[in-house]
Amino acid sequence: MMVVLHHLRFSETELGPFGVKIFFVISGFVMWLTTASADISPATFWRRRLIRIVPLYWFFLALLVAVALSAPQFLNTTAVTYEAIIKSFLFIPHYHAVQGFIAPLLIPGWSLNYEMFFYFVFGFALLIKSPSSRAVAIGIVLGGLVLLGLLIDSRDAVVVTFTSPNLILFVDGVVLAILYRTFDLGSGKLGLILICIGALLAPIGFSRFGTAANFVGLAPALIVAGIIAFEPAIRRAPSTILHTIGDASYSIYLSHLFALRLFELGWRHVVTFQPSLVLEVVYVGFAFIFAIAGGVAVHYFVERPTLVLLHRNKVAAKPA
């Protein structure tokens, strides 16, 4: 939801990127938690992650390319080239032709370049049977790449991406998962304290001291730790709406730019009043709801059926 708000009216802030940093920590946490007690091969791990990530991303990326080629007047920040198409589909980092920063044609996909690289490293780490040695190996590889990035001066998109301090956030998630499995972290008060400290520290990562703060990944890690500590309280008072939005988060993330653009075009044709603060607030509120609802719809009518179909085909392909 932070990313939706970022693209809706807060694009000049770090709200969206910080939300993605939190997601990177969660990704490291979940990957470790779901594999720590399982005997899973790298191939099986990679196959599961590809099935989970790639189909929906390719769906919206193909949709964007189709619109850009057939009706470019409806897009503001998309310039299609064959190179950009190939690199976007293959998760190869490159500079966006219009925006100038490193991102695929479907801009939210920039975070998936990091995710896919983390899965690549994590999959090989599964060859190490000792959990402690595996965690150390992941930390050494990702931390070493970040240190390398601090030592070299490169503008190459691949080098910049895969030596970015963002990689440390995945390590933070792994560390949190190990602590979660070792200690009882369930405490509402502790959770509130950690989230507040993380929120207060967040601006440090956006200042001139950002390199050091991002290297540690302290603010997003503390916020995720606080959420983990809150987990028992959340289970006692579950929210259907929040649970649904959580399940649909990936669909919301990939579809929200389409939803926001559709809402903007519709708003221009329907609303003829003079701009005002009240009208701006109304617009932001309804556009936000429209993007969230659209993502939930995508989750139920596109993402879930696709995942069911792919998993069913996988089971059917197994010999009897």
Image (cartoon, helix red, strand yellow):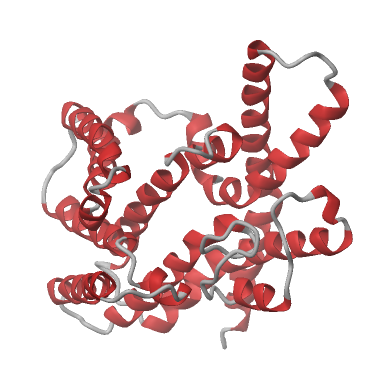
The answer to which quarter of the image holds residue 86 is bottom right
Q: In the displayed structure, would residue 149 be above or below residue 204?
A: below
Q: Quadrant of residue 174?
A: bottom left
Q: Quadrant of residue 124?
A: bottom left
**Between 117 and 216, which is closer to the camera in this rendering?**
216
267 sits left or right of 29 in the view: right
Question: Residue at the location (29% across, 43% down)?
Answer: 207
Q: Nearer the viewer, residue 27 or 311?
A: 27
Drawn side of residue 101 relative to residue 304, left or right: left
Taking the spot 17% from the left edge, 58% from the top edge, the residue there is 178
8 versus 79 height, above or below:
above
Q: Indicate the position of residue 246 as horizontal and vertical percent values.
A: 49, 42
Residue drawn where x is 63% and y is 66% of the image: 55
- Residue at the image point whose x is 54% and y is 73% from the top: 91
Is 286 on the left-hand or right-hand side of 221? Answer: right
Measured as percent of width and height from the top left, residue 66 is found at 81, 63
131 vs 300, left or right, is left
Q: Nearer the viewer, residue 182 or 267?
A: 267
Image position, residue 58 (x, y; %): 66, 67
Q: What is the x, y in percent for residue 188?
A: 21, 28
